[in-house]
Amino acid sequence: MQINWLGHSCFLINVQTEKNGPIKILIDPFDEKTGLKMPKVEADILLISHDHFDHNNKSAVKGDYFLIDSPGEFEVKGIYIEGISAFHDEQEGKERGAVTIYKIEAEDLKICHLSDFCQRTLNSYQEEKIGEPDVLMVPVGGNFTLGPAEAWKVVQEINPKIIIPMHYKTPELKIDLKGVKEFLKEAGQEDIVSEKKLTIKKKDLEAKEMEIVVLESK
């Protein structure tokens, strides 16, 4: 499996399946009103976590994709995907509505994308559904999502093998967020060097525990 960060909360995940060959999963493509340039990309499966302009730019995506934009259980092209309800604020959605957390199971790996999660903590239903993923994509920029300190607390609750921070301030982004360095400071790992992509297999994760991977956007 290969994971590429396209910026903000957008990821392209390349998966190899036994029956359907290579599958491209795209999560939360953004509008260029964010200040970021959305790369040209094709997808077989498109996941939209909520209907905000920095997460729902379907028009930027090419291909005859299968769209998932709500909670529920889905099996598409040999890949299991579950959408889990969550809130975009601390007032049970009264301020910014709901979001969908996505759990993806493929290549014997479990990937979790937390969307714009902004609750103080996971509830028991969310904890049960999320379980202990191999890879967790977590928002860390604050303001509209978890801030650096809150994000680190939620990461510790979930206890993933690998953590990929997202939804934080980058040079071109017009949205007011904190930078990733503040999250790394909370985690006591300020010296991390960013990587272009993450390529993983299940066997590679056996010795890993709460490792942070900072990806460069495409």
Image (cartoon, helix red, strand yellow):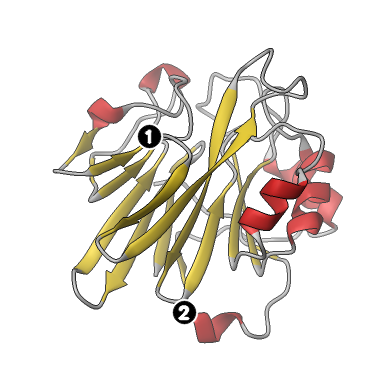
The image quadrant where one finds the N terminus is bottom left
Q: Residue furthest top?
A: 95
Query: Left or right of 146: which side holds 96?
Result: left
Crowding at dot 2, Cα within 10 Å, few <14 / some 14-19 / many 20+, comes out as few
Question: Can see residue 190?
Answer: no
Location of residue 55 with respect to 186 vertically, above or below: above
Identified at 42% across, 36% down, the residue is 28
Location of residue 93 with respect to 129 vertically, above or below: above
Q: Nearer the viewer, residue 90 or 38?
A: 90
Identified at 80% across, 41% down, the residue is 121
Query: Disc number at residue 29?
Result: 1
Query: What x and y, as percent, mark residue 175?
Result: 58, 20
Callout 1–callout 2 Cβ contact below 8 Å: no
Location of residue 126 with respect to 31 vertically, above or below: below
Crowding at dot 1, Cα within 10 Å, few <14 / some 14-19 / many 20+, comes out as many
Identified at 38% across, 34% down, the residue is 29
Query: Disc number at residue 139?
Result: none
Q: Tag 1: residue type?
A: Pro
Q: Nearer the viewer, residue 201 or 126?
A: 126
Query: What x and y, as percent, mark residue 101?
Result: 55, 43
Question: Can see residue 18?
Answer: yes
Query: What x and y, as percent, mark residue 194?
Result: 58, 57
Residue on which disc 2 sits:
201
Q: Nearer the viewer, residue 185 or 54?
A: 54
Identified at 85% across, 49% down, the residue is 186
Query: What x and y, as percent, mark residue 172?
Result: 50, 27
Labels 1 and 2: the sequence-earlier one: 1
